[in-house]
Image (cartoon, grey):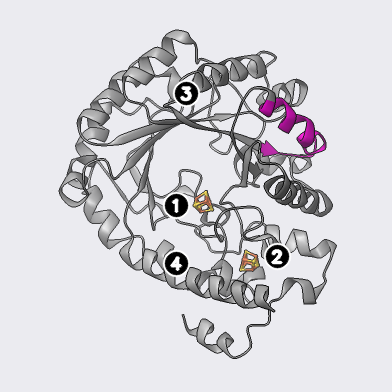
């Protein structure tokens, strides 16, 4: 009983928190899609990037001009610019961009496949003030190289990680896209990461977007999805050697708080914005590009952030398709923005549905909110 009351209170507080965060919509993370070029050709790429993209990299000056107005509104160092691509390491001027961001009062980090991360690059980026870095590792050698479509990609990513952890002031995490192959080796992968002294690990499943949309064998079955949740929950509960978390990608029903530190909250357009390669202003870069809210070449980024994004800040329109009558809508709020398209045809997949189709024990999954239910409904 004590446990149930505790859970009711924490759900209640989370919903107030989510409502406030949405109202305030403070920009904390700004993705900069600086290039579409990539040195790999991953089977699951959400960006659908090409090895030699015909789309030119965005000149750094364009991005810098666009973010100037943010300085009037936000305290120094409060915004983290997350440099993404494509593969950011392909930009010759990456360290220079980072240094200038730092000089202008923005913290910065990057997301990389690690392939081009060597000693020289590490030294340059660290001295340019890089504060954190995310490296993808999608399984042990065979499975990582299969997904990344390159026989050396595993070795290169591991080498990058060894360099990164050798510098204790650098924040980092490893991200793994779980698919039908590597789901079978997660325990082994965990031991490998621990043997490499990796402390932070984040797991995604592969979303049916980009190239992955054409390869359904990469999506986990319902059974595997549930096994994945159990793996994460067990590791979090019993293995203090590594901090494992499930990504923000989906509401997970009963597993909420067991697989992450906090309840599901898609912060796209609420705390997360982006400047896309063509100057488009959006939220997470993996969102349908038809949701763009403006363009840095014609609009003021701060104005757009402050006055648009209604589509992401009020998700009532998500009550359609399988979400229409979903009992968990009030907790989930229509799921991940990256799984919607601008036609609003319904969400492209729901992890909670996958999990609960395996074991639909209603009493387990539904906390009776009793008299507070109506109040929560109104929030
Ligand atoms: S759009 Fe997707 S990646 Fe972005 S915050 Fe929402 S769930 Fe997370
Ligand atoms: S059906 Fe929609 S609202 Fe319900 S849990 Fe899934 S994504 Fe969320």
Which structural element holds mark 3? Answer: loop
Disc 1: which residue: 290
Residue 115 left/right relative to 153: left
Q: Are marks 2 and 3 in contact (CB under 8 Å)?
A: no
Is 351 within the magenta? no
> Dot 1: within a 10 Å radius of its alpha carbon, few (fewer than 14), some, or many (20 or more) residues?
few
Mark found first going from the N terminus, 2 or 1: 2
Tell me the residue at 69%/57% (across/down): 351
By secondary structure, the bulk of the magenta-drawn segment is best described as helix
Task: For marks 3 and 1, give the one nearer the viewer.
Answer: 3
Mark found first going from the N terminus, 4 or 3: 4
Tell me the residue at 52%/61% (across/down): 343
In the picture, the disc for residue 254 is: 2
Label 2 vs label 3: CA separation?
40 Å
Mark found first going from the N terminus, 2 or 3: 3
Mark found first going from the N terminus, 3 or 1: 3
Task: Depth check: give the residue in front, 175 or 354.
Answer: 175
Q: Quadrant of residue 66?
A: top left
Q: What span is in magenta?
A: 177-194
Disc 3: which residue: 37
Task: Depth check: give the residue in front, 49 or 201.
Answer: 201
Disc 4: which residue: 18
């Amino acid at each position: 009983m004590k446990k149930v009351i505790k859970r009711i209170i924490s759900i209640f507080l989370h919903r107030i928190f989510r409502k406030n965060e949405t109202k305030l919509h403070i920009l904390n993370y700004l993705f900069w899609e600086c290039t579409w070029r990539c040195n790999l050709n991953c089977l699951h790429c959400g960006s659908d990037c090409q090895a030699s993209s015909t789309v030119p990299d965005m000149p750094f000056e364009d991005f810098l001009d666009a973010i100037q107005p943010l300085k009037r509104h936000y305290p120094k160092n409060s915004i983290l610019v997350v440099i993404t691509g494509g593969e950011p390491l392909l930009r010759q001027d990456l360290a220079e961009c980072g240094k200038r961001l730092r000089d202008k009062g923005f913290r910065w980090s990057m997301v990389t496949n690690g392939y081009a991360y060597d000693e020289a690059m590490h030294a340059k980026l660290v001295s340019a003030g890089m504060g954190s870095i995310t490296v993808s590792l999608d399984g042990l050698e065979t499975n990582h190289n299969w997904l990344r479509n390159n026989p050396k990609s595993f070795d290169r990513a591991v080498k990058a990680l060894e360099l990164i952890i050798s510098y204790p002031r650098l924040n980092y995490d490893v991200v793994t896209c779980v698919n039908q192959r590597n789901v079978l080796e997660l325990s082994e992968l965990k031991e490998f990461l621990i043997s490499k002294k990796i402390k932070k690990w984040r797991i995604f499943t592969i979303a049916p977007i980009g190239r992955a949309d054409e390869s359904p064998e990469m999506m986990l079955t319902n059974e595997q999805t549930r096994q994945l949740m159990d793996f994460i929950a067990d590791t979090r509960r019993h293995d203090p050697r590594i901090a494992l978390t499930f990504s923000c990608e989906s509401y997970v029903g009963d597993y909420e708080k067991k697989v992450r530190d906090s309840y599901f909250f898609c912060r796209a357009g609420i705390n997360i914005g982006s400047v896309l390669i063509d100057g488009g202003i959006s939220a997470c870069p993996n969102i349908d590009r038809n949701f763009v809210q403006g363009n840095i070449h014609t609009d003021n980024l701060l104005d757009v952030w402050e006055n648009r994004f209604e589509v992401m800040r009020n998700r009532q329109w998500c009550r359609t398709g399988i979400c229409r009558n979903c009992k968990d809508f009030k907790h989930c709020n229509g799921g991940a923005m990256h799984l919607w398209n601008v036609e609003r045809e319904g969400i492209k997949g729901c992890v909670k549905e996958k999990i609960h189709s395996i074991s639909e024990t209603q009493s387990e999954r539904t906390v009776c909110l009793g008299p507070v239910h109506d109040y929560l409904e109104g929030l």
